[in-house]
Image (spheres, coloured by chain):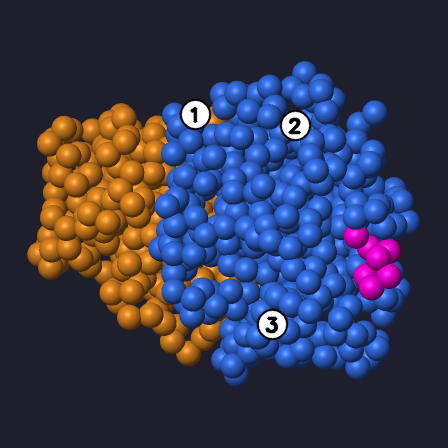
Chain colours: A orange, B blue
Amino acid sequence: MREVAILGVGQTQFGELWDRSFREIGIEAGFKALESSKLSSKDLSALYIGNMASGAFIDQEHVGPLVLDYSGLAGHHIPSVRVEAGEASGAMALAQAYLAVASGAYDFVVVGGAEKMTDVPDERGAAIASSTMDQEWERVFGASMASLWGLIARRHMIDHGTKREEFARLSVLDHENGSKNPLAHFRNKITLEQVLGANPVAEPLGMLDCAPSSDGAAALVLGPLETARKYTDTPIRISASQIATDFVALMHRRSITTIDSTVIAAQRAFQQAKTDPSHLRLAEIHDSYSIGGLMALEDLGFYPKGAAGKALSDGAVGTGGKLTINTSGGLKAQGQPFGAVGIAQVAEIVRQLRGEAGPRQVSGPEMGLAHNVGGSGATSIVHILSRVN
Amino acid sequence: MREVAILGVGQTQFGELWDRSFREIGIEAGFKALESSKLSSKDLSALYIGNMASGAFIDQEHVGPLVLDYSGLAGHHIPSVRVEAGEASGAMALAQAYLAVASGAYDFVVVGGAEKMTDVPDERGAAIASSTMDQEWERVFGASMASLWGLIARRHMIDHGTKREEFARLSVLDHENGSKNPLAHFRNKITLEQVLGANPVAEPLGMLDCAPSSDGAAALVLGPLETARKYTDTPIRISASQIATDFVALMHRRSITTIDSTVIAAQRAFQQAKTDPSHLRLAEIHDSYSIGGLMALEDLGFYPKGAAGKALSDGAVGTGGKLTINTSGGLKAQGQPFGAVGIAQVAEIVRQLRGEAGPRQVSGPEMGLAHNVGGSGATSIVHILSRVN
């Protein structure tokens, strides 16, 4: 397989975009990604789209050709593929597009992620958000996604001595970062006291531990690494693209305080990229619930189990710490349009590696990791990206 | 890219399976496919699933890991990817799995297609079935999938002199073939008079011109061709796997009596397989509406535009004719579980090429084609399969 590079990135505003349709945001992200490379749409061989639930949210399946069509590309008749893996649909689309370019089947591919979530009533939205758990063995008994993560959080506190304040700090950090990201859903800073005092959702989790429902889209342009400099001065190498799965229902897992799919996807990714967690200083981690972000720091291999909470409290994790995470604002502040999250994470790492992250820019990163999770952990996908020197 | 072979096929009963769940039929098809090869589940590198609308039909997204899990494979943590392209979701999943094996990323992959359609009320099912057209520019004005195909049929009659009886004959042929397929949804034979006299759905189409809503699943095992004989005595080569797209809304197309995506996918497939329509004597064509099947005979290159109707009437198409089609019973009689159709078509071609089609067996086929369509033609996918001598 040949090496694959990211040649361009594009992203829409994330938020409650009531005046914009699914197809509009999908197109905007794709064109922005093309514009940021030197490619034109006629150079494209295929389109991949990560989307979780357009059928349920907007009564529209078959969104692959829909976005292609409204981008003015239907006349090219190129393949357009929708990929779904719950909230990891974006990274799953990237993983498939990566394989397609690596195989030699396609040269230049746009891979986008998009979701339009705020056109349904809140209770319907919550039901759709829970459709990535096991309907017959979890949801039917009343579980919601928030309640599962609440159970996980309580168990993590009991088994590993994790304190309520420790995962609350992740929301504070996300909002601090989001305040510097003009595309973020939330740009207000919040305090630890606000997170701790927010209305309870599924104890110990409160409203400010939970990422919002957002509309938004993001896109990347992929191509072969060997010719990448023709199309951009700053190609970014995809050093690893790895997927792992696990049991869907929480009750079947080996442990509920470790997401095995994340542990295994990360191990595979570090092996593919020939590196290890000690060399990574930049990551976008999946924190749809703050406890999930804390666990990701452990399961990705950055901290031993039970040690991430203290690292967050001590400031070892965050801008300026040993490990900088979620400069985008993470899922909590940048927002959570399900299908777009995995692509937006990678887009932020690309901006950082290119030195284009503006007030969020960290100093001279060479490598970054993006971690996207579907459901309560049945799918995890890890990408490692590197500067090409 | 390396060559890819099909090592095994499996399929459930198609029909109204009210006593069986999505996951049950998905698992059955996958295990049957594995059983028909000499592989065991621990040999698998990945799972691909074609599914159109599980979120809308059964409130369940994230069906990739769900089927993997309930197959007893969650402990392997292998990637499981859901792919969606409307009613072409099955063939789209196959096209992605083919690329993944061809690339060398994975060795042995199960690719399945599944849909559970009959657990919703009929009017809800019809709405979901129309979610592959353009919601904002077709459905919102009252179009249904049947009405679009009715328009197409009327235009084809006017422009090409096609007679009502000519496409009605396809339904008769499908039911004749379906009567020999124990897995078919409908096994009753029907007469031309019955098709012509059936209740109108969208004139000129009547109820017996329209494929049913079905539950069902089918699966294939893929692997590298070079080692295929270790796992089966009759490996089948994937000689071509090609996707093409077109405008989603009918009103934007160059013509509504030609499905351009089918024309182009077929041209690409014949080129990849280094053959042409004159060498093909066996095909499974997408006939969700009888007029669609008639047009496919033209758009795939078997007949000039306007000539397929007469060929159907003359008996040139059908068992024993120049071209044998839809020995499975086609979408009309075998049934139409959306995500499973494209895989079931390929499974039937494999059975024919292996000489395992029982009373439906045609004499000594060397090659066969499968044609799967999404929406009213925004996606078409063509696979060409060959015996390995």
Residue A135 can be seen, yes or no = yes
- Inspect the image, locate mark 2, and give the three-letter code of the amino acid beneath it: Leu
SS assignment at label 3: loop
SS assignment at label 2: strand
- Inspect the image, locate mark 3, and give the three-letter code of the amino acid beneath it: Ala
**Which quarter shows the C terminus of chain A?**
top right
| Residue shown at the point (62%, 57%) measured from the top left | B332
Sequence-first tag of 3 and 1 = 1
| Residue shown at the point (34%, 34%) measured from the top left | A247
Tags 3 and 1 touching, CB below 8 Å: no
Mark 2 vs mark 1, CA separation in Å: 21 Å
Q: Which residue bears the numbered disc 3?
A: B198
Sequence-first tag of 3 and 2 = 2
Q: Same subunit under labels 3 and 1? A: yes
Structural crowding at the residue carrying mark 1, measured as other residues with C-alpha within 10 Å and reported as few (<14), some (14–19) or many (≥20):
some
* Magenta region: B312-318
The foreground one among B198 and A32 is: B198
Any magenta on residue B293? Answer: no
SS assignment at label 1: helix
- Give residue B116's mark: none
The foreground one among B237 and B172 is: B172
In the rendered image, the vertical position of residue B345 relative to residue B295, given as above or below:
above
Sequence-first tag of 2 and 1 = 2
Q: Same subunit under labels 2 and 1? A: yes
In the rendered image, the vertical position of residue B153 relative to residue B296, given as above or below:
below
Q: Is residue A48 left or right of residue A22?
A: right
Structural crowding at the residue carrying mark 2, measured as other residues with C-alpha within 10 Å and reported as few (<14), some (14–19) or many (≥20):
many
- Give residue B76's mark: 1
Q: Which residue bears the numbered disc 2?
A: B7
